[in-house]
Image (spheres, grey):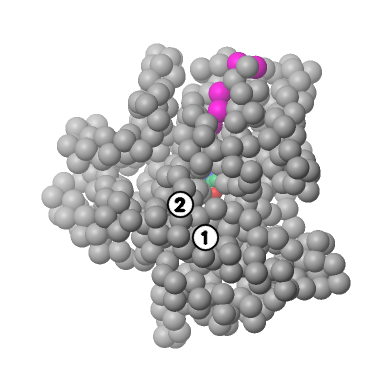
Amino acid sequence: MQAADGKRYLDFYNNVPCLGHCHPSVVQAVSRQIGTLNVHTRYLVSAVDDYLDSLKATLPESITNIVMTCSGSEANDLAMRLAKQATGGEGFIVTEDAYHGNTSLVTEVSPSIIKQGKLPAHVVAIPPPSSAVYGEDIATGFAAKVTEAIELLWERGFSVAALLVDTIFSSDGIYTEPRGFLKKAVDVVHNAGGVFIADEVQPGFARLGEAFWGFDFHGVTPDIVTMGKPMGNGFPMAAVATRSEYLASFCSDVGYFNTFGGNPVAAAAGQAVLDTIQQENLQTNALVMGHYLKTRLQSIASQSAYVAEVRGQGLFMGIDIGKADNKQIPDPLKTKQVINGLKAAGVLIGAAGRFGATLKLRPLLTLTQSEADFFLDAFVQQV
Ligand SMILES: Cc1ncc(COP(=O)(O)O)c(C=O)c1O
């Protein structure tokens, strides 16, 4: 990337243009489609049908229907409405620093952006799946918190509609280990009559290397999947994917129409993203380069006064930055200094987590070893 002053930056901040900024396959697909036909979704267009078939091929067999939207917020809003309809419940369980979007309904389940006041009574937030909270057995501890949340909802007069999590817990600070820890929590919510909504807006589309989706990484099958951000490599598009019976039941009560969701240009962009991930082996690249980055970062952590922990999977990682005299204490100020130092060195990166002291690494899926080394050389100077 090049700024207006000509300075070049390596983008480690951004999982939206997952294939790289202005990737020619997306540019050409979008240009071709907008030069052919672009209409709203009252029309049947084969480009859209073909894209949905390609997208469905990446999803579990039980997830047979897809509704396209324009943003992840719209997708989560519809997912919540589907969950309520499917279960008859009203209660939602999320993590304490979750972000799921900006509609009125979704803001209520996004504790990280609520600045004043409490969550509404039908929403319970539980601590993120970190070893600092749950110790060694994160799966059991996290599932126990889901049980407690269900009981609390009952006390407040609500039955559970859904456990809704970003499957990489990005705004909570990025938690992926131990692989599979989500399963017990999902079982708990199912046994209580709720559904599991996997918010894949952040981890989806091959970024985790080992798996195309975050829920796949954990070996769980969601009832509802939401997706967005990297789906169109920057073209605004998102979707909800779910079981046919949930949509049938929902649509028997209320209609859903989204003028621009699933327009043919979005489908063209989405198809180009799926094709390019496959043709350029980007899931494998995420796995290989993610492993390389993590190994090097762990070695930096072992020698650094500031780097407390490196977490994550594939090309989605979190680095906890702590105080010089005790790196286990989060240091948001130092984190800001590291971000600014990296920017001066030509690397863009952001922060996440409760304290804003976890560097959030989301480089492009095309990351090369020399780009990774450029970042590592710049990073080591800061810590
Ligand atoms: C996990 C997660 N879900 C949903 C959203 C909302 O997506 P959008 O900004 O496209 O509405 C975001 C946005 O950052 C997100 O991080």
Q: Which of the image's four quarters has the C terminus?
A: bottom right
Q: Residue 36: say if magenta.
A: no
Secondary-structure class at tag 1: helix
In the picture, the disc for residue 209 is 2
Give the number of callouts.
2
x then y, percent, for residue 381: 64, 82
x then y, percent, for residue 130: 72, 46
- In this view of the protein, can residue 114 be seen by the observer? no
In the picture, the disc for residue 291 is 1
Give neighbour class at mark 1: few <14, some 14-19, many 20+ (Cα, 10 Å). Answer: some
- Chain part drawn in magenta: 192-197
**In the picture shown, does residue 286 fall above or below 79?**
below
- The residue depicted at 45 percent of the width and 52 percent of the height is 209
Image check: 172 left or right of 88? right
- In this view of the protein, can residue 374 be seen by the observer? yes
In the picture, the disc for residue 365 is none
Image check: 268 left or right of 258? left
Q: Nearer the viewer, mark 1 or mark 2?
A: 1
Most distant residue in the right direction: 325
**In the picture shown, does residue 308 fall above or below 117?**
below
The reply to whether dot 1 and dot 2 touch (C-beta < 8 Å) is yes
Amino acid, disc 2: Gly
Secondary-structure class at tag 2: loop
- The residue depicted at 38 percent of the width and 64 percent of the height is 366
Q: Along the line of sight, which residue is nearer the eye, 220 or 9?
A: 220
